[in-house]
Amino acid sequence: MECSRCGSANAATHHYCAFCGSLLRQGAPGPEGAVLFPDAPRKERPADTGFLLLAASFLLVGVLYYTWTHFGAKEPEGAANGYRMLSILTLIINAAEFAIMAVFTRRTGYRLAIVACGVLFTILQFLLYLPFWTSPQ
């Protein structure tokens, strides 16, 4: 196979030129007309989508807390109801974050660990908020 950059002859099994180091043409026909290095189709990495969804959900939780802290109801009854609603939304969003991590993780062992941590975290968060949700004020 001939290098398109320096013109040197290379073995048909080389991916890079032995003389200049440049990438040899992919998809070049071999001695019998077979394609030696077929162009592989580019695949979108699902992890990128997962990270984007996680970042958006973290941002959403931060915006909710910031908005409620600075612009929420100032009277005790309104503040308690708003905080209850905010805690329920946070619980749902946190569960969704763990689900996103589990869906976009490739290794099964990691996926099981993420699901276990997500279930444990959701239960602990539910137990933490439960007395506040059931209190009269």
Image (spheres, rainbow, N blue to C red):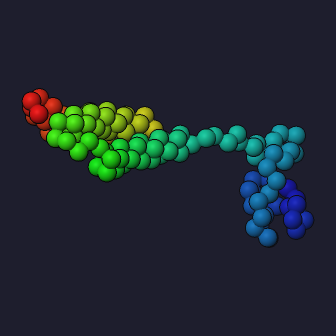
- In this view, which residue lies farthest toward the front? 75
Residue that extends furthest to the bottom in the rendered view of this protein:
19
Residue 52 vs residue 71, the one in the foreground: 71
Q: With respect to residue 17, does 101 lie above or below?
A: above
How far from the left and from the top, in percent, is residue 102? Answer: 38, 36
Residue 78 in sight here? yes
The residue at 33%/47% (across/down) is 71
Q: Position of residue 86 (x, y in %)?
A: 28, 37
- Direction from residue 51 to residue 88 in the image, left or right: left
- Residue nearer the viewer, 119 or 109: 119
x 77%, y 64%: residue:
22
Circle count: 0
Q: Is residue 117 left or right of residue 93?
A: left
Q: Residue furthest right?
A: 7
Q: Say which quarter of the image contains residue 130.
A: top left
Q: Is residue 76 left or right of residue 48?
A: left
Identify the residue at horizontal 19%, vertical 42% (top origin).
75
From the top left corner, tell me how far across and down residue 31 is, in percent.
87, 45
Report the quarter where the N terminus lies.
bottom right
User: On screen, 19 above or below 90?
Assistant: below
Q: Position of residue 82 (x, y in %)?
A: 25, 36
Image quadrant holding the C terminus, namely top left
Residue 24, image quadrant: bottom right
Whether residue 112 is visible here, answered yes or no, is no
Residue at the spot x=79%, y=70% of the render? 20
